[in-house]
Amino acid sequence: MHQINNQFLRSHYAKQERKIIRKSGNIIGGIILAALLFIDIISEIIGEVIIAFSEYYIIDYTLTSYALQIALSAMLFVPPFFIMANVQGFRVRDLFVRKKVPFLTNTSIILSGFMLCLAINIVTNYWVQFLESLGMNTQYSGLPEPATIYETIIWIFTISVMPAIVEEFAFRVVVLGSLRRFSDSFAIFASAALFGLVHGNFIQIPFAFLIGLVFAYVTINTGSVIPAIIIHFLNNFNSCIMALIGKNFPLYVQVLVSYGIIIVVGILGALSLKYLSKKHMLSKQLYKPECLTSAPMAFGAFFSSPFIIALTAILVIGAILLV
């Protein structure tokens, strides 16, 4: 009888844990859905206002596009995620980790993380070629290209600096931080999956998911979000540099620079991984609470919550419509 009662209690507590995880999924999914809807409405309104003003005033559409992108990114990834943390009972400052990492260790983590991002970029290029072989559209409209040095500086800030700060705050501070109570491995995969989905197209979804795993693991391993912000910036900045070279120089220059970066970062990254291995930084155990729900079960519970299902469906349908 004792064994039966024990099994019953285990089943009961496991169900309660999954219920709590689904509740977190509903909060996170619902707030992201509301934020995306709000941004869509605001974008439409601002677009109409710009069209109306353009009849009477000369508008610099390039700089205006950059300014709007910066403002909308801040609105999408900062206030809603503050709300998300508070609704779940967390203070954002409590989710920030303030662990100091030695300079050499920090540099090694950044170099090895950037190396992994470059490797994921290479894999993504093959993924793009595969999609194109199926006749799928892989060219998505983005920000206008800069024509002056001033525009280039603002463009780099818009693409490299701003996303690195606000997206890492949203997904590695708030989402990852609030889910770690259910286990680190679950939090890493769940936050990376959401990070991939919000990128909204079939090129960036798998790419963002994979680099999201890197950013999340680095944040947990170091106890600080700063290395992830720097790696995120370097990844985006590298894309900016390659785009500028491709626009202003012959193809062979772009190829030489690209391979040069891959070789140099590859060597430094490999040396960094060796150093981190000696320091036992790669063998740190992830936090696993004393609960009855395994990481795969937690992941299933999280993504079976109604608002996460709705968010996933909307974003996947949106990605399909872009094809």
Image (cartoon, rainbow, N blue to C red):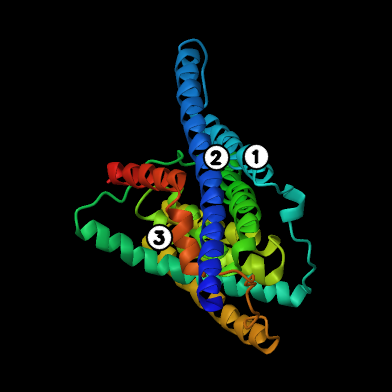
Instruction: Report the Cα–Cα distance between label 1 and label 2.
Output: 8 Å
C-beta proximity under 8 Å, tags 3 and 2: no
Q: Earlier in the sequence, mark 1 or mark 3?
A: 1
**Going by the image, does 11 lie left or right of 217?**
left
Q: Is the residue 159 above or below the residue 257 in the image? A: above
Instruction: Report the Cα–Cα distance between label 3 and label 2.
Output: 23 Å
C-beta proximity under 8 Å, tags 1 and 2: yes
Amino acid marked by disc 1: Ile
Q: Return the x and y of residue 86 as percentages of the image width and height.
A: 69, 43
**Going by the image, does 144 lie left or right of 230?**
left
Which residue bears the numbered disc 2?
31
Amino acid marked by disc 3: Pro
Could you classify mark 3 by the number of other residues whose Cα lies within 10 Å: few (under 14), some (14-19), or many (20 or more)? many
Instruction: Report the Cα–Cα distance between label 1 and label 3.
Output: 27 Å
Which residue bears the numbered disc 1?
83
Q: Is residue 159 visible?
A: no
Q: Nearer the viewer, residue 225 or 135?
A: 225
Which label was assigned to residue 237?
none
